[in-house]
Image: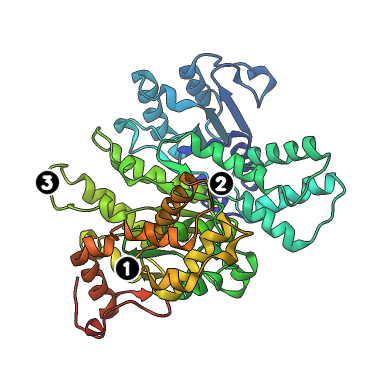
Amino acid sequence: MSKFSEELELLLRSRYSLIYIATLEEERIELTIKQSAKQQGNRPVYIWDFVEGYQEGNPNDLGFGCRNPLQALEFVEKLADSSPAIFILRDFHRFLDDLAISRKLRNLARRLKSQPKNIILLSPQVVIPPDLSEVLTVLEFPLPDRLEIQAEVQRLLAATGYSGEVSQLDEMVRSFQGLSIERIRRILAKAIATHGEIRLDDVDLILEEKRQTIRQTQILDFYPAQENISDIGGLDNLKDWLLRRGGAFSEQARQYGLPYPRGLLLVGIQGTGKSLTAKAIAHHWHLPLLRLDVGRLFGGLVGESESRTRQMIQLSEALAPCVLWIDEIDKAFSGMNSQGDAGTANRVFGTFITWLAEKTSPVFVVATANNIQSLPPEILRKGRFDEIFFVGLPFQEERQAIFEVHLSKLRPHGIKNYDFNRLAYETPDFSGAEIEQILIEAMHIGFSQNRDFTTEDILEAASQIVPLARTAQEQIQFLQQWAAAGKARLASRNSNLSPRFQGEDFKV
C-alpha cells in the first residue's frame, strides 16, 4: 500500500468529513479511493460532476444534482445517518466562492462528524477560500511511483507479447518517472502505432512528452543537451567525480543503499566550461535537462513569487529524475538585503535553499556562479550540494585538450595540420570560451583569403583578443584566493592557483 493510500484510509477512519485532493489524474485517484473504500468494509462510492450529476450508486439517484452543486451536497443528507458512504465531487473548486455552497459545506462538516460519511472534493489545483480553510483537509495525490509505472509497463508489454531484459525495463521505468499513468499510456500507444510494438529504447517519445509538460509553464525550459563528457577539455577531477555517479539513479543503486546525488555548485571564471558541464551531465546520464531562469520566479503580485517557486519545485520533482540547471545563481540572489521588494527575494531564497537541503527526489541541481561574493553564505553550507567545485582558467595541457576538442569537430580530417603544443603554449590566461572565439576569428581570416585556416591564423587571432583574465584581475584573484583557502574542490588535477595563496586563511 502506498503512503498516500495509508494517509487517505486513516482520514476516512478518523471521520474527516471534508477532504480536498489536488490532482490532474482523475481516473487514477477515483480508482485509489474505491480501493480504500473497499478496505473500509465495501463502503458505497457516489461520484458527481456538474454535467451528469451523480453517476454511481443507487440507480434511482442517477443524474441527481445535474448542473446544481448545491443539490449535490443536499444529496448527502438524503442518506440515513448510519449509512456509510464516500462522495466524490469532481471540479468542485469552481463553486467554493458561492456563499450557499460555502455555508452548506461548513454545515455538513459539523453534521458528518458523527456519521460514517466523507465528502472528497477533486480539483486540478489547490484553490480554497479563507472561510473553508479550517474545515477542508488537503491532500496532494502524487504521480505514480516506480512500482506503479513498472506494473503498467509490464502489463502493456505482456499484451504485445514482449519479454525484455530487466535492466532495460528498469531504464524505461526510470525514464517514465514524472509522468502520469495517462501520459505513459499515450506514449506506449504512440510507440505501438509507430513501430507496431513497444521498444524499450523509445526514450525520445518519453522526453517529448516531458517537453509537453514543461511547455505548459513559463518558469522552466526544456534544454536539449547533446554535449558529451568528452567535449569538456580538462577538468579531470570534476569529470571523474561525475563518471563515478553515472549509475546513481538506477534501482540497483537504491538497493545498494545509495541516496540520490543532490547536486553541484560550479564556481569560477566566465567561459571556463561550467554551463557546458551542466549539459554534458544530463546527456551522459540520459536525463532531461531543465534550465531555470531565476528571474522568472519573481512576479509583480503579492505572493506570486513564492507561488512560482513552489511550482518550480513541484514541476522539477514531477519530472524527476532530471538535471535542474541554474545558470549564474549569484546574479539571481545578489543584494537580497535590500528592502525594496518587501522581503520577497529573501522568502524565495529561503524556500529554495530549504528544498535543496531537504529534498529526497532525484533532482540533480547544477548551479553555476561567477561572483562568489554575491552569493549568500547559506548556500555554501554543507548539505545544500554534494560538492562545490572551483573551475579555474585552463592550464597548458588543458588548453591543448580544448583546442583538440574544437578542431576535431571543425577539421576532423585535417587535425594533424595544427601544432597543438604551440597553440596551448602561446595562449596563457585564455578560457575555453575565448579559445573557441579565437578559432572562429581564425576561420574568418582563412575564409576571407579563400583558403583553410592555419596555426598561424589562430595565433594571429589570439593576439587580437584580450582575455578576461587580464581585464578582471581583481575578481579572478579573489576567486583564486577563495579556492586556495580550501573553500571548494579543484575541478582540475593541476591548478593555476598562485603558490602564495596556498593554505592562506581566507573567508567569504
Single out the mark in the foreground, 2 or 3. 3
- Residue 31 lies left or right of residue 447; in this view the side is right
- From the image, which quarter does the N terminus lie in? bottom right
Residue 55 visible within the image: yes
3D distance between C-alphas at marks 1 and 2: 49 Å
Q: Is residue 488 above or below residue 109?
A: below
Please name the amino acid that badge 2 sits on. Leu
Q: Which mark is residue 339?
A: 3
Please name the amino acid that badge 1 sits on. Asp
Q: Earlier in the sequence, mark 2 or mark 3?
A: 2
Residue drawn at x 61%, y 36% is 30
SS class, disc 2: loop
Query: In the image shown, does 203 or 37 lie closer to the viewer?
Result: 203
Q: Is residue 470 above or below residue 452?
A: below
Q: Quadrant of residue 465?
A: bottom left
Q: Earlier in the sequence, mark 1 or mark 2?
A: 2
Single out the mark in the foreground, 1 or 2. 1
Residue lying at the far top of the rendered structure: 67
SS class, disc 1: loop
Query: In the image shown, does 421 or 89 lie closer to the viewer?
Result: 421
The residue under label 2 is 143
Q: Which mark is residue 27?
A: none
Q: Label 3 crowding class (10 Å Cα cut-off): few <14, some 14-19, many 20+?
A: few
Q: Label 1 crowding class (10 Å Cα cut-off): few <14, some 14-19, many 20+?
A: some
SS class, disc 3: loop
